Image (spheres, helix red, strand yellow):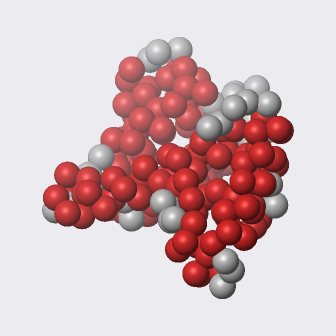
Amino acid sequence: MLFKLIERAQKNDKLAMLEMIERFKPLLKKYAAKLKYEDAYDDILLYFIERIKNFNLEKQICRNDEAVASYMKVCIKNFCNKKGKESAKSKNEIVLSALTQEQAYYAEVELSKEDKEDIFMELGIKNLLNEEEARMLYMVYIEGYTITEIARSCNKTRQAVNQFKNRVLRKVKKALDVELF
């Protein structure tokens, strides 16, 4: 019976599609309630309709109602698990407009640092340098530390740190064959 309904629904029989939806409505509502977001039922319903439309009738070995119902249940369950994970990730996100002006400023500063870090990746600089050399450039050009501050934190002389920075810059310039400064 379900197999025939799917077959008719795939041929754009609206009554067959409505009957499929009615038969699976309790299951759809059950999983929508587990997702706990406003449009969960609509998302599951849309997915269910897509599954019916894309259901490969030729590959189906068992054509009885239990097999078809079990297949649909597993599809819906997997969809809900995926949506649940996506929903959990989005709960950790904070909208910038919900922050105070001061919090938004600090968030912008941190995000701009990430953008600058991407420049290192785009140019392939991190691949050219060892960890210590990359850290030096990062501290000077991304975090904005002075040579003196870096020297104090590393317990080295200012001249030693400056010479190291210049060696790293020459290495990058030579590798990229571009004049950086």
Location of residue 164 in the rendering, given as x and y in whole percent from the top left corner: 74, 62
Q: Which residue corresponds to the image point at 42% horizontal and 45% vertical from the top-left? A: 44
Q: Quadrant of residue 3 in the image? A: top right
Instruction: Find the residue positioned furthest to the bottom.
Output: 155
Q: Can residue 4 be seen in this view?
A: no
Location of residue 173 in the rendering, given as x and y in whole percent from the top left corner: 76, 39
Quadrant where the image shows the N terminus:
top right
Location of residue 61 in the rendering, given as x and y in whole percent from the top left corner: 79, 38
Q: Which residue corresponds to the image point at 64% horizontal and 56% vertical from the top-left? A: 137
**Image: 45 above or below 105:** above
Closer to us: 94 or 114: 114
Q: Which residue corresponds to the image point at 53% horizontal and 74% vertical from the top-left? A: 149
Quadrant where the image shows the C terminus:
top right
Q: Quadrant of residue 101 in the image? A: bottom left
Image side of residue 174 versus residue 134, left or right? right
Instruction: Find the residue positioned furthest to the front.
Output: 159
**Image: 54 above or below 109:** above
Closer to us: 148 or 51: 148
Closer to us: 48 or 113: 113
Please tell me how many numbered marks the rendered image carries: 0
Location of residue 8 in the rendering, given as x and y in whole percent from the top left corner: 53, 21
Instruction: Find the residue positioned furthest to the left.
Output: 100
Q: Can residue 160 be seen in this view?
A: yes
Q: Which residue corresponds to the image point at 48% horizontal and 39% vertical from the top-left? A: 48
